[in-house]
Image: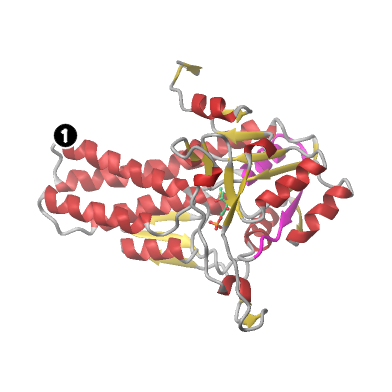
Amino acid sequence: MLPTIAREADVVVMIDQRKLPVQEVYVRCRTAPEVARAIKTMVIRGAPAIGVAAAMGIAIGMRASKATGTQKFAGEFFRICDLMAATRPTAVNLFWAIERMKHSFGAGAEAGESVDQLKDRLDREAEAIHDEDVASCRAMGAYGAAVVPADARILTHCNAGALATAGYGTALGVIRGAVEAGKRVAVFADETRPFLQGARLTAWELVRDGIDTTVITDNMAGALMRQGQVNFVVVGADRIAANGDTANKIGTYTVAVLAREHNIPFYVAAPLSTIDLHTPDGTHIPIEERSAKEVTHVGPARLTPEGARVWNPAFDVTPHGLIAGIITERGILRPPYTESLKQAFEPLVAGIRV
Ligand code: MRU
């Protein structure tokens, strides 16, 4: 499996996604601020991967603490949580992972655990967040494979693969699941301007797995669909509101509209950690705006004239009405999403919802 992120003693190691596919180099983060910077600068990106990185960053940050009393230790802990929370605003997995770390910390503190015990507990929680993400992706892959056509020509946008998660991927997990289930699969990867996650990362992952891959620029998707060359669309998500409205990489909305026009099923694949029941609908999802330089330049080369303004939202929102189903680790959720999303969180006893 692809080594997106791993913990080596007190270092968090990440493959540098800014350099792929040309160079396969690893960044070693030794402090919490280094992890926060790696998230902000997109060394690591993708909603679930960002959550895992933040949890590991908190764990190594607290491991390095010199505090001997829990009060001072707690102060440092909350400062590091705030640092992680300030990195990227849209992917709710980041805030979900920080909340999980806080919850674990709170339980330990309440039980009167020592600083050393709290450090161990934070390590274990970060590891669990990592391992559960891989398991969720595998489950999504198995559920999603069932709705992929036997002879599939799949369009995907951005990178919702192993690189965007702790491993295996969400949308690419569904694609991998379909391949493992014996389906014939060809994938069209949208280039995904401006950061080129599709051209660089999705294509890299799929080619490594030996999956038939064609890269298209974003503006080719409509013509491809009109020619009848796409029969399934699957994308990831950064935040799914309580009514099913879904924030994902800029350009996803355009793909969803095109899919509706051409009667192609449009699916979102995401773990429950991407569902935000506290956000009622897409209008309330904070959308990150990134540096103009991502648009004005490709590498060191300038594309646009000085003086032209730039709009660079990193995400858009696809209205729930365009989404055929949301593939999660608990099965495929269907409209009305206001009901099915809520139900997905109900506890299971022996596999039955209670
Ligand atoms: O800006 P990025 O590269 O972090 O955006 C990533 C996406 O939009 C992904 O599709 C999303 O996070 C899902 S990843 C499983």
Query: At x 50% / y 41%, what residue is drawn?
Result: 274
Mark 1 secondary-structure assignment: loop
The one nearer the camera, 352 or 162, is: 352
Q: Residue 86 at x, y = what percent?
A: 37, 58
Q: Is residue 30 above or below residue 131?
A: below
Q: Residue 268 at x, y = what percent?
A: 63, 40
Q: Residue 37 at x, y = what percent?
A: 40, 65
Q: Is residue 234 above or below residue 147?
A: below
Give neighbour class at mark 1: few <14, some 14-19, many 20+ (Cα, 10 Å). Answer: few
Q: Residue 344 at x, y = what percent?
A: 51, 27
Q: Is residue 92 visible?
A: yes
Q: Amino acid at mark 1?
A: Ala
Q: Please say whether residue 192 is one of the residues in the magenta stretch.
A: yes
The one nearer the camera, 93 or 291, is: 291
Q: Quadrant of the C terminus?
A: top left
Q: Is residue 118 left or right of residue 94?
A: left
Q: Is residue 59 left or right of residue 248?
A: left
Query: At x 82% / y 42%, what residue is drawn?
Result: 262
The one nearer the camera, 206 or 255, is: 255
Q: Magenta stretch: give its range.
A: 171-193
